[in-house]
Amino acid sequence: MREPKLIDYLLLTILALIWASAFFNIKIATYSYGPVTIAFLRIFFGAIPVVALCFFKRIKIEAFSKDWYWFASIGLINLVIPFFLIAYGVQKVQSNLAAILMASTPLSATLLAHLFTDNEKINFIKVLGVLVGFSGIVFLFSDNILINESNFFSAFLILIGSTFYVIGGLLTIKISNKKNENVTASILIWATIFLIPITAYTEQPWNLNPSVESTISVIYLGVVATGLAWLLRFRILIRNGLVFQAQVAYLIPIFGVILGYIFLKELITSKVLIALIAVIIGIYLVKKSNKNDIVA
């Protein structure tokens, strides 16, 4: 991979901002839409730019090929379930808390990769990183101002949602020989198929009278925070590699807290800041260990 240039760091920052902006937009979307509908619309609108790119680049979409069950499984585990859990949880917690909780994904990935892969085993630095990061998450749950009996379960569901992202990522390894655009388009198609009947049965969104703000947010979540963000991720991966792209994990919780304050005037307590720092340090230690493994 080539040496990163200024434009590469700019694109990485933009990607982090886009993904971080998803959290306060989910919060705004919950003002008018139910969590199942948010998940469906986010996936549906997200599929449009990805499928369009596949047609433009003449990339075959294999959603209904002999490997359909892999795409269907990943669509369910990596999109449908976490998108629903996050939207459900954000109804009762601040979006900045969701950004920090979701930042635990690299930490969960470290534990699960050790159990289910052959080349990503835990070492001392990784263990230290996981302990520091999850200590920050546990400390965050002790913030009685923002997390209490009324929303504790909602915050926990967001944490569970982040774990499903990791499981879906591990499943994606099974089809890693396929083009990223094809895989993403295929899992988005299957996720849409799953959610059409569920959304129609549980929330009947056609009966809603949503606000303009919530509608703009849910369209943004799909087209920008899901579809375009994944395409930007592909570009960064191809030009700069996985180690460089993984640095986005440091920026997302920071931007998530800042954007939540700017757009929603969300409270930032001392425990939020301590938890944020602990999670970032934990991610840094895990990524540092991964980088050393690659160099070695």
Image (tube, rainbow, N blue to C red):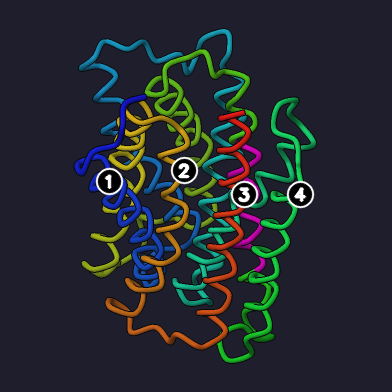
Q: Quadrant of residue 5?
A: top left
For the N terminus, which image quadrant? top left
> Relative to the observer, which residue lies in front, 223 or 266?
266
Q: How far apart are the alpha carbons under marks 2 and 3? A: 11 Å
Few, some or many residues within 10 Å of mark 4 (<14, 14–19, 20+):
few
Between disc 4 and disc 2, the foreground one is 4
Where residue 211 appears, x then y in whole percent?
26, 70
Residue at the disc numbered 1: 9
Circle 3 residues within 10 Å: few <14, some 14–19, many ≥20: many
The residue furthest right is: 115
Q: Position of residue 263 (x, y in %)?
A: 28, 76
Q: What residue lies at 48% left-to-right and 64% top-to-bottom? A: 99
Please rate how many residues cluster around mark 1, counting C-alpha atoms within 10 Å: few if below 14, some from 14 to 19, many from 20. Answer: some
Which quadrant of the structure image shows residue 202? Answer: bottom right
Q: Amino acid at mark 3?
A: Val
* Residue under numbered circle 3: 286
User: Residue 124: which disc?
Assistant: 4
State the residue lying farthest toward the front: 296
User: CA separation, marks 1 and 2?
Assistant: 12 Å
Q: In the image, which is nearer the foreground, mark 4 or mark 3?
A: 4
